[in-house]
Image: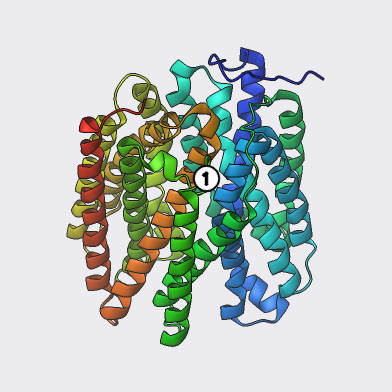
């Protein structure tokens, strides 16, 4: 077995054979980590019944995973800069695989939630450095294509998740939703050992204080925001949000004094990088608003089944699978501000077009609107992620990779909170709530479009 080691100045990536194996391990790992965040939702009713718990308690099977991912993304991306992206990736993949096995054999809710926390930490290890690894795997002039391949896997896994979950549950118990990951995790780990390069190390020390502050800030703020939509007690919400804000302030102040901060305030000094993050958060918020609002509209106002609704929404991720590689290739030659601005304008138009849908629309009327929205989102996604990873020095690729995932999760959380508030304020009128949420989504897409075009005038990083 040969270990490939890259020097900092090397920019041509891996040889073709090693490149294919390296991209395959990343493809497999991203796919199973995305599926792990989706397929558990489908089985919550079965888990509730078999484990003899309340539906509210079973929700923690999902929340524990998401929370573990969010609080550990930036610390693990910083660790990737320090210890090497391959080590963090393989450690995360190994933990994810073992935790999936533990989830599959869990016989109580507490055991399942504990295993899901570990699975989330492992998934964060994968997601925190996958884009950074792509930067060292593919040649510099093909970076857009490499980033696009990651977006393609995410879109494909998201689209296939409910179908895969339904197929597994039709043949076996919910335990196999987790055991399903194990052979793929083993295969990805074997490929990673053989193909992934050892990347340069930053030489900095890991800052445990920043890691604790990061976990407190992101964890408490996201729990507090989520609690707004679930009508948690006002005193509890205030405590969570205030403590989270204090932790965030302390974190930012500490990061300004560090040479390689965990929260990459050094990267945010670049206007191009900061605008790309804002664009990403707003676009994912817009996508989430549609994903949450339209199923309620079709189910309650139109009386559609879950299967019918799933088929109607599928064109969105399906067209992303087609558009993302094309946009990735274009991003190697054209600025992300232009490509992203065009894509987000199309996304905004697509969301606005959904406002004219009746409760029980003809299939084609929904499909073309979903295709339009998905095409716009896919045209934005790859160029934007390329801009984020390319906007950081190579020694800070891990930090940039962590920001990409953190921005996505922040946008999704923000979108979910906005939809929950809208449905709460307009309680009893599903059609009005869905239309308002779509208008809010279109507004976020419009803001993202303007911000994306502003990148064309932003100074390029040195």
**Residue 414 picture location, percent across and down:** 37, 62
**Residue 69 picture location, percent across and down:** 58, 55
Q: Secondary structure at mark 1?
A: loop
**Residue 310 picture location, percent across and down:** 43, 56
Q: Is 95 rendered above or below residue 71? A: above
Tell me: 160 left or right of 312. Answer: right
Visible residue check, residue 357: no
The N terminus lies in quadrant = top right
**Residue 281 picture location, percent across and down:** 36, 51
Residue at the image position 29 percent from the left and 73 percent from the top: 422
Visible residue check, residue 389: yes
Q: Is 24 rendered above or below residue 126? A: above
Q: How many marks?
A: 1
**Residue 423 picture quarter:** bottom left
Tell me: 7 left or right of 273. Answer: right
Residue placed most toward the observer, 130 or 397: 397
Residue at the image position 63 percent from the left and 43 percent from the top: 79
What residue sits right under mark 1 in the picture? 258
Residue placed most toward the observer, 452 or 177: 452
**Residue 90 picture quarter:** top right
Tell me: 423 left or right of 219. Answer: left
């Amino acid at each position: 077995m040969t270990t490939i080691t890259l020097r900092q100045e090397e920019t041509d990536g891996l040889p073709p054979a090693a490149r294919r194996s390296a991209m395959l391990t990343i493809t497999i790992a991203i796919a199973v980590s995305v599926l792990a965040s989706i397929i558990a939702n489908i089985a919550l009713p079965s888990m509730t019944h078999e484990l003899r718990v309340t539906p509210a308690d079973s929700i923690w099977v999902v929340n524990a995973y998401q929370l573990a991912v969010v609080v550990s993304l930036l610390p693990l991306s910083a660790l990737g800069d320090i210890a090497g992206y391959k080590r963090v990736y393989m450690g995360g993949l190994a933990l994810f695989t073992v935790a999936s096995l533990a989830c599959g054999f869990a016989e109580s809710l507490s055991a399942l939630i504990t295993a899901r926390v570990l699975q989330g930490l492992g998934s964060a290890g994968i997601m925190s450095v996958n884009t950074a690894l792509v930067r060292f795997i593919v040649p510099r002039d093909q970076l857009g294509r490499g980033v696009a391949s990651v977006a393609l896997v995410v879109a494909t896994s998201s689209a296939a998740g409910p179908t895969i979950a339904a197929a597994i549950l039709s043949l076996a118990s919910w335990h196999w939703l987790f055991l399903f990951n194990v052979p793929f995790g083993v295969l990805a780990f074997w490929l990673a050992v053989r193909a992934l390069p050892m990347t340069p190390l930053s030489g900095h020390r890991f800052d445990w204080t920043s890691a604790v502050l990061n976990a407190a800030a992101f964890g408490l703020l996201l729990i507090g925001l989520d609690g707004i939509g679930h009508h948690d007690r006002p005193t509890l919400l205030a405590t969570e949000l205030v403590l989270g804000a204090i932790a965030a302030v302390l974190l930012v102040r500490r990061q300004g004094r560090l040479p390689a901060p965990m929260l990459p305030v050094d990267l945010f000094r670049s206007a191009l990088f900061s605008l790309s993050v804002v664009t990403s958060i707003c676009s994912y918020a817009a996508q989430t608003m549609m994903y949450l609002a339209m199923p309620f509209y079709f189910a309650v106002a139109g009386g559609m089944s879950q299967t019918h609704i799933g088929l109607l929404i599928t064109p969105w991720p399906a067209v992303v699978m087609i558009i993302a590689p094309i946009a990735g290739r274009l991003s190697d030659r054209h600025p992300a501000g232009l490509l992203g601005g065009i894509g987000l304008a199309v996304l905004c138009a697509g969301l606005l077009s959904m406002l004219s849908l009746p409760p029980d629309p003809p299939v084609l009327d929904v499909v073309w609107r979903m295709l339009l929205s998905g095409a716009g989102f896919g045209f934005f996604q790859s160029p934007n992620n390329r801009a984020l990873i390319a906007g950081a020095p190579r020694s800070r690729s891990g930090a940039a990779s962590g920001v990409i995932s953190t921005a996505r999760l922040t946008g999704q959380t923000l979108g979910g909170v906005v939809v929950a508030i809208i449905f709460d304020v307009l309680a009893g009128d599903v059609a009005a709530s869905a239309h308002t949420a779509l208008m809010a989504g279109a507004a976020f897409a419009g803001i993202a479009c303007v911000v994306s075009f502003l990148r064309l005038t932003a100074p390029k990083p040195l």
